[in-house]
Image (tube, rainbow, N blue to C red):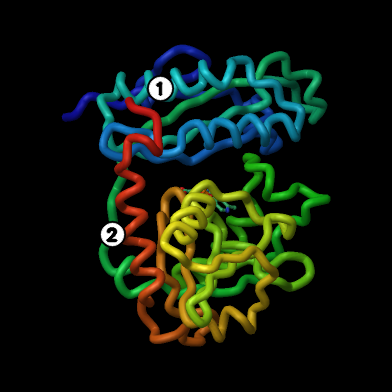
Amino acid sequence: MDKELEIYIDGKYYPKSQAKISVYDHGFLYGDGVFEGIRAYNGSVFKLKEHVERLYASAHAMMLNIPITQEQMIAAVVGTLRRNKLKDAYIRLVVTRGVGDLGLDPRKCSIASVIIITDRISLHEGEAKIKGITTLISWVRRDPVDGTSHEIKSLNYLNSVMAKIEANMSGADEAICLDKNGCVAEGVGENIFVVKNGKITTPPTSTGALEGITAKAVVKLAEKLGYEITVANVTPFQLFNADELFFTGTAAEIVPIRQVNWRQIGSGTAGPVTKKLMEEFKKIVNDPNEGVPI
Ligand code: PXG
């Protein structure tokens, strides 16, 4: 059997089967914490600095003091990957408020906990990437920016989980979430892009969508390729009548969407703009200049 992967918890390493946190941790009791999902490609951690920056920005917004610096966090991620001899990996960074008592007052938690999970990545490129996926616009609205905004990548993902359940029950591959005004926000763990007449549009983060790191890289890529790309409100009607739709995200990378609430999108398969971006995106994830070496 392969050697068990090791997990970093507060500066120490534990085999996966023994990596545990307290049931009094407020990350567990209240979803009081932040996280990041990151990927390593071919010995380079894609956009690691950007993910770490976003983690600290989320923590800052909820006044969660991370006990190590961003540089130490980057070194700890790289160290964990090296220890596990991983070159292609999925990385989950979690910072919880730490151990407190049963009351929600964060002042009872003396120190935040830092957890780094690095795992093998299961690649299921197959059908979804070629044919596209089916989606359902869920009744579950994105939390507004004056609520538990999705600008904060917190441990409370109930909003996304409930939308995903709706998609599962209806037989759709993924869910699409609207903002409180009924405009399109994002997927449950992906940003969304619309292609119409060769132009690309993506909804603003002010409606509660996460500022996706993949989305940002795709915007830059699209601009470099000469596409016109704008950030603007998108309605469900515009989704139904798009030429192409696609999701972006760390796990998803770029995934074409072929159906929204039983309506076929464009030709019903991956369109030319999506295909071009997928092709070019493959190149940048493998570019060592786009990440941090392991
Ligand atoms: N929106 C939300 C709500 C997210 O949680 C994205 C967009 C895409 O962002 P990035 O920076 O990854 O391009 C996310 C990503 C996963 C996973 O396994 C990812 C997220 C959450 C849960 C699981 O990819 N966040």
Whether residue 91 appears in this view of the structure is: yes
Q: Is residue 198 left or right of residue 204?
A: left
Question: Residue 94 in the image: x percent, y percent?
Answer: 55, 31
Q: Is residue 143 left or right of residue 213?
A: right
Question: Residue 103 in the image: x percent, y percent?
Answer: 80, 28
Q: Which residue is mark 1?
A: 18
Q: Which residue is mark 2?
A: 125
**Quadrant location of the C terminus in the rendered image:** top left
Residue drawn at x 41%, y 64% as measured from the top left: 255
Dot 1 alpha-carbon crowd within 10 angstroms: few under 14, some 14 to 19, many 20 or more:
few
Residue drawn at x 49%, y 59% as measured from the top left: 223
How far apart are the two marked residues, 2 and 1, measured between alpha carbons? 32 Å
Q: Is residue 146 above or below residue 259?
A: above
Question: What is the quadrant of residue 76 in the picture?
Answer: top left
Question: Residue 126 in the image: x percent, y percent?
Answer: 26, 64
Dot 2 alpha-carbon crowd within 10 angstroms: few under 14, some 14 to 19, many 20 or more:
few
**In the image, what residue type sits under mark 2?**
Glu
Question: Residue 66 in the image: x percent, y percent?
Answer: 64, 21
Whether residue 171 appears in this view of the structure is: no
On residue 286, which mark appears?
A: none
